[in-house]
Image (spheres, rainbow, N blue to C red):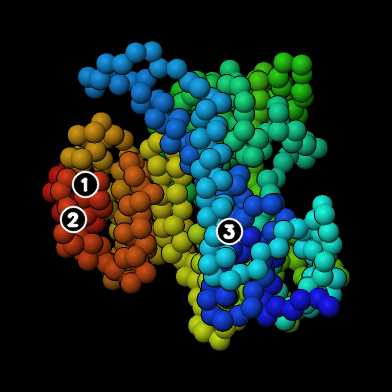
Amino acid sequence: MAEKFDVTVIGGGPAGYVCAIRLSQLGLKTACIESRGSLGGTCLNIGCIPSKSLLNMSESFHRAKNFSDIGIETGEIKLNLEKMMSNKDSSVATLTKGVEFLFKKNKVTYIKGVGSFSEKNEILIKNDKSEIKIKTDKTIISTGSEPLSLPGIDFDEKKILSSTGALNISKLPKKMVVVGGGYIGLEMGSVWSRLGTEVHVIEYLDHITPGLDKEISKEFMKILKKQNIKFELNTKVEKISKKDQGVTIETSNKDAKNKIEADVVLISVGRKPYTDKLNLEKIGVNLDKKGKIIVNKNFETNVKNVYAIGDVIDGPMLAHKAEEEGIAVAELIAGQSGHVNYDIIPGVIYTSPEVAYVGKNEEQLKERKVNYKVGKFPFIANSRAKAINEPEGFVKILAESTTDRVLGVHIIGPHAGEMIAEMSIAMEFGASSEDIARTCHAHPTFSEAIKEAALSVDKRQIHS
C-alpha cells in the first residue's frame, strides 16, 4: 500500500526544501521529491552558490595580481583552474549535504527521483533503481527553471554553454562570447575575464541589464568596460557554428553583419519554467503563454489542493523570492497567514563592484507618473571606500515628493549586496528618506553612503 503524506513537495530547490521544512515544523507529514540526486536545486548545485564561489576566487586572483600597487610584493601569481573548480565543488557538496541534514532534523521524508502526477492525489516517482507511488492530500510544485537557448541552437556544454557549462570549464578559454547582457551573463563573463579570458558581450537591446535603473546600468557598463569586457549593443545573433577549434558567431545590427571567432560562447538569454515531466495535463493544471503555472494570491492552481511556487510561477526568478513563497504557502496550508511583499524583493548582481536594488527605478516611476525626489552619493566621497581603493559607483535613493516615503534604492559599489538589506527593511516598514538620514551609521563604513544619499534627497549631504 502506498505511503500517504499530508503534503508532498515536488522539487528540492530553494522554494521546495524551505517549504518542506516549514511544513514539517507546522506538524504536517511532508515528503520532498528531488530528481537531481542532491538537494538545493539550481541555486546550490549549478547556480547561485558555485557562481559566487568562482566570483570570489576570481576576484581574489585578480587582486593578488595587483598587490604590488598597494605595497605588497609577491612572487609570480599562477592560476590553478583545476584546484579552483575543486574548491567550488567542495562548497556545493557541503551545502547540499547540509540541506539533507536539515531534512533529517525536521523529519522531512526525502525521496530521490522524478515525480509526476498519476492522478491528483497520487504521485509516481521514478529513478534508476525503482518506481514507487505515494498518496498525498496536497501537492506543491516547485520544480524551478532551466536555461533558455536561442532558436535552433542547442547547448553542448563544451563550446556552446549554458550557465551550467560556464561553471565547469576545464581549460581557460582565450576568448569567450557572452550572448545576453543580463545578470547571469555578466557575472560569468566577469569570472572568466578576471582569470584572463577575452570576453565579448552581445546584447540585442541598446543597454545591458534590462529592468535595472538606466542610470545604474549605464554606470555599470562603463565600469565593466574599464575591466576590459567588450560590448556590442543593438546586435542580434543570427547563427552559431561549431568548428574544430571553437565557434563562429554571426551577428547583425543596423549597420552591418559580422562574424566573431571564439573558443566558447555562453548563451545567457533567460530561463524557462521546468514543468515538462510533471504530467500536468493529466490533472488539468493551467499554464500561461510562457509555460508558467497560473496561481492565485494563495499560490493555488486551478486544481484544488495543488499549489505552485518559485520559478514555475510568475515573478522574478530569484532564490530568495522562491524561499519567501515556500514559507508563505506552507503557513497558508497550515491555516496561518502567509504573505510575500513583491514590491520589496531585492536583486543583486555579484560582479565587482556589486549592483543591488530594491523597489522601483526611475523609469517605472516616470511611467506611473509618480512625483519623486532623487538623492545620490558617490563612493569616491566615502572614507571607507577610498581607504581600501574601491571608489567606484554610488547610492541612489528615490523618495515620493510629498510624503518622502522611500520608493526605490539602487546601489552600485562595494558590498552593495549586503548594504541593500538595510533599505529593504526600511521600505518594509514605510521609512522616509528623513528616517534614514537621521539614523546614526558607524564610521568608517560603506553604509554611510546610504545615509548621505538620504540627506541628498533634500540637498543637505555633508561630504560631497
Q: Which mark is residue 445?
A: 1
Q: Residues within 10 Å of mark 1 (few under 14, many from 20)?
A: few
Q: Are marks 1 and 3 in contact (CB under 8 Å)?
A: no
Q: Residues within 10 Å of mark 2 (few under 14, many from 20)?
A: some
Q: Is residue 286 above or below residue 171?
A: below
Residue 327, percent across and down?
53, 71
- Per the image, label 2 sits on a secondary structure element best described as loop
| Residue 218 visible to an observer of this rendering | no
Q: Is residue 137 above or below residue 415?
A: below
Residue receiving disc 3 = 100
Q: CA distance from mark 3 to mark 2?
A: 39 Å
Q: Amino acid at mark 2?
A: His
Residue at 77% x, 35% y is 153
Residue at 31% x, 16% y is 74
Residue 225, percent across and down?
44, 27
Residue at 40% x, 25% y is 62
